Image: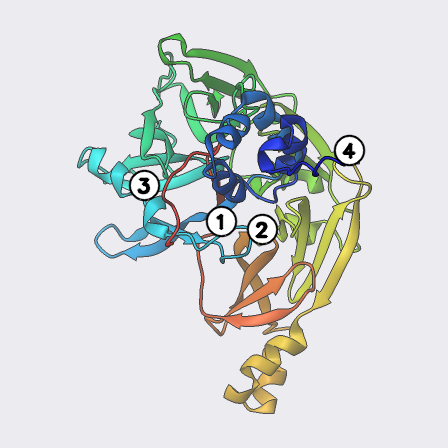
Amino acid sequence: MADAPTRTSIDDVTDDLLELVFLHVPSPTSLIRAAAVCKPWRRLIADARFLRRFHMLHRPAVAGYHFNKPRFCKWEKEIIYKPAFEPVASSTQLPAINARHFSLDFLSDNMTAEFIKPEIMDSRGSLLLMEFRGSNCNNLSHDFPGALVVCEPLTKRYAAIPRPWDFDASSCQYERSYLLDGGVADEAGDRIGMSNFRVLFELNRGNRAHATVFTAGGDMSSWSEKAIDDLLPVINYKRHVLGRAAGSWYFFNREHCSTTGVVLDGSTGEYSSFEMPNVDEDWSVHNKWNHRFYVTDDCDGKPCILSLVDTNLRVFTKRGGDNSDEWVLMNQVTLLETVLAQIGGRYEPDELELMNSCRYKLTLSMSTRATGFIILQLDPYESRFFSVDLKAMEVKLTKKCPGKIMYPSELPWPPALHTITDA
């Protein structure tokens, strides 16, 4: 008599096979749910080797975007910023995010009353870099910020960054700060976290540009500095910050009609040069005060350069991916007809013709740069905003106008069982 077939269950699946299945889980949120099923699955998913492999295969989950919301302060007679957060739309891979878990109110409670001007300077992974300045210090000050903080909004942790020990305001000018990856990856494969980050300060010492780097390490924190005047002779008003993309910052010097830009790699902390896209116009068009080059992420998180002249928008991406140095035209659109269609009902035909004449030419200015889209403002007659999808090049009228740059905020890695959803 033949033996009855042996029944199998999920417990008979080997760890190697389970690991292959878990590596194809679409998001860290789904991975957390799998880890909650049983102790054996949790043990396998929590293993540092598995987390490193998963981290290499999947892009980090972006929970939303922090930005500096501008507002005019009557008594200060200047624009000041209020940090805000906008969660991403819910999807099958990421449930609805509760924005209050990413609030920065915990920083306000811990800052002294004299530091009332917060501003987000950079983001990387789940961390934010923020400056706090005093009420008597304007946004153009070259003195070191009253407080400089790296924080993780979800876990409410933060670390104050000291000023360089040899910073002397009489002979040194502070320009800007940036958040960099830590020197080495942790056991879960992450190179950025509250115990593993670096902050780069751009300084002018005399007539030379310097980069000073603070490396976090608790009691073992360290400083390093190097001159960067071979690429940035001096950091002043002639240098235009194009924006950030793929975790790096892009710059362009408006002097001498140069076609060479500079990029700061947010992973290595190194500066390098690159050639700007080839455009048809005279380069003096882009070297005026109303500069027209910008940088942001495309829909896939890759860097793209935007050229905006009057109502003509062009999008350039790298030929062959990140390893290429050549920027090629991917999309272009003339926004004039769309803009006139949106505002046409408010003006007579002869008025529209005058507004678009050479003397009173309609222009669009950059208001917001974000992943996969931008927001433009119509000048000089209207305070209307238009959202442009950088992939489909679709233009829509929008009422929302966040800050200049929307900084992505990722979920912390390795994933933890935080209550971040509305469910």
The amino acid type, in three-letter code, at marker 2 is Thr
Q: State the SS at label 2.
A: loop
Precedes in sequence: disc 4 or disc 2:
4
Precedes in sequence: disc 3 or disc 4:
3
The amino acid type, in three-letter code, at marker 1 is Met
From this view, report whether residue 366 is shown above or below residue 21. Answer: below
Give the distance between the C-alpha atoms of the residues marked 1 and 2, in whole angstroms: 8 Å
Precedes in sequence: disc 2 or disc 3:
3
The amino acid type, in three-letter code, at marker 3 is Pro
Q: State the SS at label 3.
A: strand
Precedes in sequence: disc 1 or disc 2:
2
Give the distance between the C-alpha atoms of the residues marked 4 and 2, in whole angstroms: 20 Å
* Residue 242 visible (yes or no): yes
Give the distance between the C-alpha atoms of the residues marked 1 and 4, in whole angstroms: 25 Å
**Residue closest to the eye, 48 or 110:** 48
Quadrant where the N terminus lies?
A: top right
At horizontal 77% and vertical 40% (from top left) the residue drawn is: 321
- Contact, CB < 8 Å: mark 3 with mark 4? no
Q: State the SS at label 4.
A: loop
In the image: residue 338, left or right of residue 162? right
Give the distance between the C-alpha atoms of the residues marked 3 and 4, in whole angstroms: 37 Å
The residue where tag 3 is placed is 118
Residue count near mark 1 (Cα–Cα under 10 Å), binned few <14, some 14–19, many ≥20: many
Quadrant where the C terminus lies?
A: bottom left
From this view, report whether residue 393 is shown above or below residue 105. Answer: below
The residue where tag 2 is placed is 371
Q: Which mark is residue 206?
A: none
Q: State the SS at label 1.
A: loop
At horizontal 68% and vertical 54% (from top left) the residue drawn is: 307
